[in-house]
Amino acid sequence: MSMDYYNTRELQGKQSNDPYFIDKMSKSSSSLSSSSLSASSPSPSPSSRDSRLVVCAPGPVIVGAGPSGLAAAACLKLKGVPSMILERSNCIASLWKLKTYNRLRLHLPKQFCELPFMPFPNDFPTYPIKQQFIQYLEDYATKYDIRPQFNVTVASAEFDPTLGFWRVRTTGVKGDDETEYVCRWLIAATGENAEALVPKLEGMTEFKGPIRHTSSYKSGEEFRGKKVLVVGCGNSGMEVCLDLCNHNARPSLVVRDTVHVLPREMLGKSTFGLSVWLLKWLPIRLVDRFLLVVSRLLLGNTSQLGLDRPKLGPLELKNLSGKTPVLDVGTLAKIKSGDIQVCPAIKRLKPHAIEFIDGRTEKFDAIILATGYRSNVPIWLKEGDMFSKEDGLPRRPFPNGWKGERGLYAVGFTKRGLLGTSMDAKRIAEDIERCWKAEAKHCTPFNA
């Protein structure tokens, strides 16, 4: 395969003036096997070869323009390292802007949700609403002059051992406009919530009412007066049930597993902030016991409502499995009053009813799946060491999952929210800065 295949109409960055890099690129293009190019797609036709654009990135390529990608780009910029963000949507923070319900607000106090080097405005409430958090992210991108390339979908990213660089192949909105980005460092910032997780329920095609994931749910207004089954009892499921109640719908909540429900605040402080403070002085099991005792006093025995608690405490369970406790914002009161019914797991769906595993059958008008999200990294990253193929998360647990081999990094996969994202973004920037400065010394004569 000749160098004509690459049709290098645009070369950006310090490598474009580096004879050593250009020589390697030429050798790689002549020796690259067809199998390496067809790992995720068939060999390109002559017409596609003529149209592909190759861009050599001066610094890291970041996949994803959500909070994780923005944090990584800002930290790198402050270290003097340029980066390039590729985003499949048409905006930053597409999950928050396009796939969240209207009443959503941060579940944790704002000081625990800040991106690096920029606090929330003082006039924001303790728990900013959706629109305020989106504005914060927009201001963050403006402050650090972060300009992602939108409507660019990463089809595959693979390390080329011959070249010693990552090859990131992308397509446009319609699957055309193929571009290949060549970079020394690759940062996966698509996060834990890249794709909606939709369970397979028996009889799903038979049910006549709408079945909707929370990623497309906006408000309970459209379900006014209807009987709605919400599947999933995490923070989203609980809050959607409350929203449905507030719009005079009749929601029921499917609880398939044990769950820790804690008050959002206790003793005049946020439960999360109080936990962080107590962990400075006490072991995690003692803190868990304290949280459960106070929760019992404030909320009562949740098991009597059909919400059995796990054997492990909320913090210990979070550390071991990443499962987040539910912070109650008023849903429990609706369950106690009977406005929200608690149901067991689903056995099968019928045209206008749902059969549960306890044998009873009830009629419902609609189903909302509050079943969470999953990582999509295994779909596009052709690498098997750093990320698990099963769940798409780093194999190494927090706080060591941010760095892989050959210049591969991960941000936003800690299962510790934006606090974990900020920690990883800073570590990645510091690590790349060391390599950047070392390589800058080597490349200075060529750039000059």
Image (cartoon, rainbow, N blue to C red):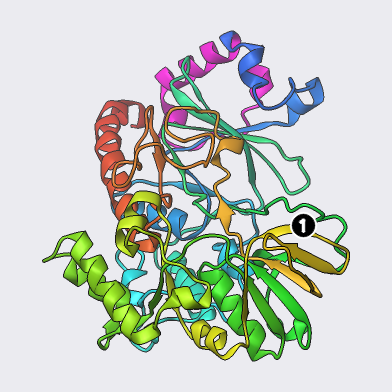
Q: Is residue 62 left or right of residue 294?
A: right
Q: Is residue 380 left or right of residue 431?
A: right
Residue 444 spot, x, y in % from top left: 29, 31
Is residue 7 inside the magenta stretch?
Answer: yes
Question: Which residue matches tag 1?
Answer: 348
As drawn, the residue found furthest toward the top would be: 31
Residue 357 spot, x, y in % from top left: 68, 59
Which residue is found at the position 59% from the left and 10% from the top?
A: 30
Identify which amino acid the numbered label 1 is placed on. Arg
Which residue is found at the position 50% from the left and 83% from the top?
A: 332
Mark 1, secondary structure of its residue: strand
Q: Relative to 446, is 125 above or below?
A: below
Any part of residue 2 in sight? no
What kind of secondary structure does the magenta stretch mostly adopt?
Answer: helix
Please state, as top left, top right, bottom left or bottom right, where the C terminus lies in the image.
top left
Any part of residue 155 in sight? yes
Residue 291 spot, x, y in % from top left: 28, 73
Which residue is found at the position 72% from the left and 86% from the top?
A: 249
Q: Relative to 127, is 26 above or below?
A: above
Which residue is found at the position 71% from the left and 84% from the top?
A: 250
**Residue 394: quadrant of the picture:** top left
Is residue 218 inside the magenta stretch?
Answer: no
Q: Is residue 189 left or right of residue 339?
A: left
Please state, as top left, top right, bottom left or bottom right, where the N terminus lies in the image.
top right
Q: What span is colored magenta in the figure? A: 2-30
For label 1, count other residues whose C-alpha is less than 10 Å away and answer few (under 14), some (14-19) or many (20+): some
